[in-house]
Amino acid sequence: MSHKKHRTLFIFGTRPEAIKLCPVVNHLRSRPEFEVSVCVTAQHRALLDQVLAVFEVVPDFDLDLMLPNQTLSQSTSRIVAGLEPVLRSAHPDMVLVQGDTTTTFSGALAGFYQKIPVGHVEAGLRTWDIWQPFPEEMNRLLATRLATLHFAATDWAAGNLYREGVPAERVAVTGNSGIDAVLYVRDKLEQGKLHGLDWPQLDPSRKLIVVTAHRRESFGEGFERICAALARLSERPDVQIVYPVHPNPNVQAPVRRHLTGRPNVLLVDPLEYVPFVDLMRRAWLLITDSGGVQEEGPSLGKPILVLREKTERPEAVQAGTVKLVGTDTECIVREATRLLEDRPEYDRMSRIHNPYGDGHASGRIADLIISFLTTSSSQIFR
Ligand code: UD1
Ligand code: UDP
């Protein structure tokens, strides 16, 4: 008896979506029940292509939409319009989106317009403040309303969805597929089957601080304060800072202005995923406003100072390995200094734990898609 394949279309556009969806794409491709296609909006270009290359994912559709210093309205409208003909020609049984970017929201909206059920990976994250992170909190709220199947990484995220009235049978806790990616790379690095960079510039006797920051709500004064803190920390002789700088011009300008030429600060282009995971493994401490880095740090046993006032990922804060420091210069310097000088405090914050997943989210997501698409209840969503 021949079975019809489940046609799934992945839509993504930025680096973090690609890191978290490529493991799912490759898992579905390994299973005979699926016919998989991939559409990239290329909301990011270079950052996205770096990830596609690592996971050997070749998109079936590439909208190539990135503009320099694009506005939110530009990206949203161009993505929604660009996806319409793709969805019409691919007519998948299900669209899959991930996270909370402009591509996530626009992809879910475009799927809804074509009456195609949408599966939302990493559903249910919330800060309950629509301005932090901006516009991601609104993007994830809207994605929840547009989606039919919700893959929550944790029980906490699933609980948020139940409380908003999302039917329980449409919500599943799968773990975060980003943890599939980071644990895979970590294990291969440990086994010597993957390799990072050599970093001849780094002095192993100094404590390495790895920094990333790019959030829109910190543009302007927030970035000035973050850079001032990094400049202060770089004056310590026992410290070295490596900062792969996000290509967004609102990030590049203040970072280059404050930190270029400082002897203990290495400003580098965004790193490919494997060298970046390797660099995090070598770090004493991570300072970041990234969602993904906040999730990866605990799996690598690294303490993290988060450059935000609110996080949608409270699990590691509750476990004591992540601390919110906002963008206040004094607070960043104080907390980083504590982790450089207070060994018991450092040890308390350096525990390996995996609150966000066990590395097997992709398989669970695949099983749930099959079960949804083979039950008659899915018919009403087409
Ligand atoms: C986007 C997401 C954010 C996510 C981040 C991950 C939105 C609203 N924001 O923010 O949630 O955390 O990606 O990195 O979706 N640029 C390049 N090359 C690239 C990528 C970006 O030059 O490969 C520059 C371009 O000038 C571009 C600008 O960065 O216009 C901003 O890109 P955009 O995707 O709009 O926002 P991000 O700040 O990257
Ligand atoms: N990352 C990377 N190279 C870098 C910096 C980050 O590969 O130079 C990875 C990081 O490991 C994580 C993801 O990019 O998986 C996070 O992306 P980003 O911070 O851009 O977005 P966010 O997670 O905040 O949405």
Image (cartoon, rainbow, N blue to C red):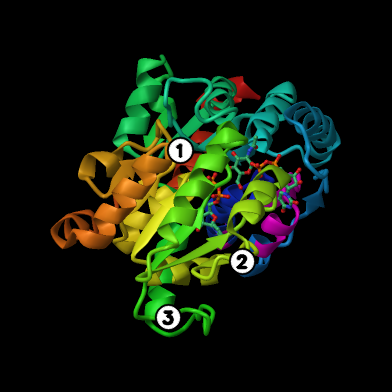
Q: Is residue 33 visible?
A: no
Badge 3 or badge 2: first in the primary sequence: 3
Q: Is residue 359 magenta?
A: no
**Residue neighbourhood size for the residue with mark 1, other residues' Cα within 10 Å, grouped as few (<14), some (14–19), many (≥20):** many
**For marks 3 and 1 on the same chain, the one whose residue lies earlier in the sequence:** 3
The alpha-carbon separation of the residues under discs 1 and 2 comes to: 23 Å
**Mark 3 — residue?**
203
Up-down relation of residue 270 to residue 250 (above or below): below
Disc on the earlier residue, 1 or 2: 2
- What span is colored magenta in the figure? 30-50
x, y percentage for residue 346? 21, 58
Of the pair 95 and 252, the residue shown nearer to us: 252
Is the residue 187 above or below the residue 118 in the image? below
Q: Which mark, residue 261?
A: 2
Question: CA–CA distance between discs 3 and 1?
Answer: 28 Å
Q: Residues within 10 Å of mark 2 (few under 14, many from 20)?
A: few
Check disc 1 and report the residue beneath it.
Answer: 327
Identified at 41% across, 19% down, the residue is 167
